[in-house]
Amino acid sequence: MKPLIKIIEKLISVFFLSMCVMIFLQVLMRYIFRKPIFWVEEFTLSVFTWVSFIGAALALRKSRHARITLFLDKMPGAMRAKVEIFGHVLVAAVSALIFYQSIKYYDLARTFVLPAINVPQSFVSTAITASALLMFIFSIEAIIKIARKKERETGEETRM
């Protein structure tokens, strides 16, 4: 799994860098040379969608997403683990629903073409599908980690 994550991180980094470079070039061309590049806005919005959605999935995997832990931090270990597992089950369920709906949307999106860059709209919508699939996988992975950690902790406690 780690090699796949590294590839995704590198790809998203390249996307983000290309987006920044294109925005810089667009500003330069528009305000200095008075000749804007007509396709940059469409390109950057498409790439930004990929960076945002896949970045959200990576943030979920690394537990760097926004969450409120005020009550969670005050819970005892066993209850905290159950609440965390419940949260990941909810994320997995919503991700599965989004994945299913995005597959249905794909058929509609592939009929539309982004005019400036001549790419099907499905290229952009695939970011949602990929993100939902990754979030589902990462949620299941987190549930397994929490369950294994809980097993180790309870196993150690019974030996004492």
Image (tube, rainbow, N blue to C red):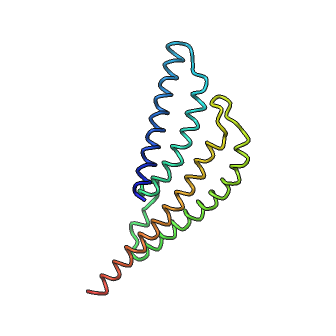
Furthest-top residue in this view: 33
Classify residue 40 by image quadrant: top right
Specify whether 77 is left or right of 110.
left
Q: Quadrant of the N terminus?
A: bottom left
Q: In the rendered view, tell whether residue 155 sits above or below residue 20.
A: below
Give coordinates of residue 63: x percent, y percent: 42, 58
* The C terminus: image quadrant: bottom left
The answer to whether 5 is drawn above or below residue 44 in the figure is below
Q: Residue at x 59, y 65 (%)?
A: 93
Task: Looking at this view, name the residue that lies furthest to the bottom.
Answer: 159
Q: Residue at coordinates 54% horizontally, 17% vertically from top-left?
A: 30
Query: Which sits in the foreground, 68 or 3?
Result: 3
Q: Is residue 111 above or below residue 97?
A: above
Q: Is 71 placed left or right of 100 in the picture?
A: left
Q: Where is residue 36 shown, x and y percent of the image? A: 57, 19
Total numbered labels placed on residues in the image: 0
Give residue 105's position: percent from left, percent from top: 70, 50
Residue, x 49% and y 23% (percent of image)? Answer: 25
Above/below status of 41 relative to 60: above
Q: Is residue 157 rendered to the left or right of residue 20?
A: left
Residue 64 in the image, given as x and y percentages of width and height? 42, 54
Q: Residue at x 47, y 69 (%)?
A: 143
